[in-house]
Image: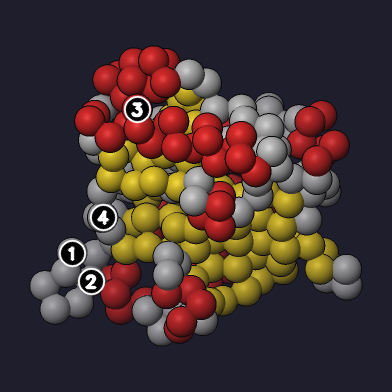
Amino acid sequence: MTGITAAGRGRGWLLEPEAKELCRAYGLPVGEWEVAREKEEALRIGERLGYPLAAKIVSPDVLHKSDVGGVALNLEEDSLGETFDRMRRIAEERKFKFEGVLLERMAPPGVETIIGAKRDPQFGPVIMFGLGGIFVEVFKDVSFRVAPIERDDAEEMVCELKAYPLLKGIRGRKPSDIECIIEALLRVSRMVNELEEIKELDLNPVIVYEKGCRAVDARVIL
């Protein structure tokens, strides 16, 4: 079982590759990614993974990548090299340590949800599920449970959302894979219950499809 890295403990949070490796170790659905440290390597990785790609700066000095211009989406082959150079320049200009660029094949569109956890000083780890992406702040359609949770708890968390009909399929929409969400909630519950070092966890968005789901972004605070 992959644990919390020593470097992560030292900085108080995990780099996205570390966070995704931890998620993968607990069986959470994450995509295939690689970290490129040079432009030529990025182009080779792009060829292996296929386009379009998402690119994110990897730096122990950057927690919120989008705040510094460290995220680029829907990249094609002709823009990948330029994007890599731009992210390296961002690190140089701001005196950030540059550990490369995480490259991942863009996930197909689906229903965006969020799975989170926070360690409450009174109740311990609390699990959250809701409508994700940009809508989490707008609609605040979320449900909570104290971990560890059982299958019935996870099912109730999904059904409690106002957006539940969207997941079930309405007006010709195909139903989303609710079983995949339930399984992901159970795995997150086990992770935060076993790893007391985790203070906060944020998987946003978790894109849900007719079959399967995928955590596109992962953030872990220690």
Cβ atoms under marks 3 and 1 closer than 8 Å: no
User: At label 3, which amino acid type do we have?
Assistant: Gly
**In this figure, which residue is indicated by the disc labeled 3?**
81
Residue 126 spot, x, y in % from top left: 71, 66
Question: Residue drawn at (45%, 58%), measured in percent from left and top?
Answer: 205
- Residue at 60 percent across and 61 percent down: it is 116
- Count neighbours of disc 2 (C-alpha within 10 A) and say few if under 14, some if 14 to 19, many if 20 or more: few
Task: Say whether marks 2 and 1 touch (CB < 8 Å).
Answer: yes
Looking at the picture, tell me which residue is in the foreground, 198 or 73: 73
Please give the residue where the numbered disc 4 appears in the rendered image.
109
Q: Which mark is residue 174?
A: 1
In three-dimensional space, the C-alpha distance between marks 4 and 2, rounded to whole angstroms, equals: 15 Å
Q: Nearer the viewer, mark 3 or mark 1?
A: 3
Kindly state the secondary structure of the residue where label 4 is placed: loop
Camera-side residue of 159 and 117? 117
Which numbered mark, 4 or 1, is in the foreground of this view?
Answer: 4
Residue 28 can be seen, yes or no: no
- 115 lies left or right of 82: right
Earlier sequence position, callout 3 versus callout 2:
3
Question: What amino acid is labelled 2 in the image?
Answer: Gly
Q: Secondary structure at mark 2?
A: loop
Q: Secondary structure at mark 3?
A: helix
Q: Quadrant of residue 74?
A: top left
Which mark is first along the chain, 2 or 4?
Answer: 4
Q: Marks 2 and 1, how far apart in space?
A: 5 Å
- Image quadrant in which the N terminus is located: top right
Q: Earlier in the sequence, mark 3 or mark 1?
A: 3
Q: Is residue 50 left or right of residue 5?
A: left
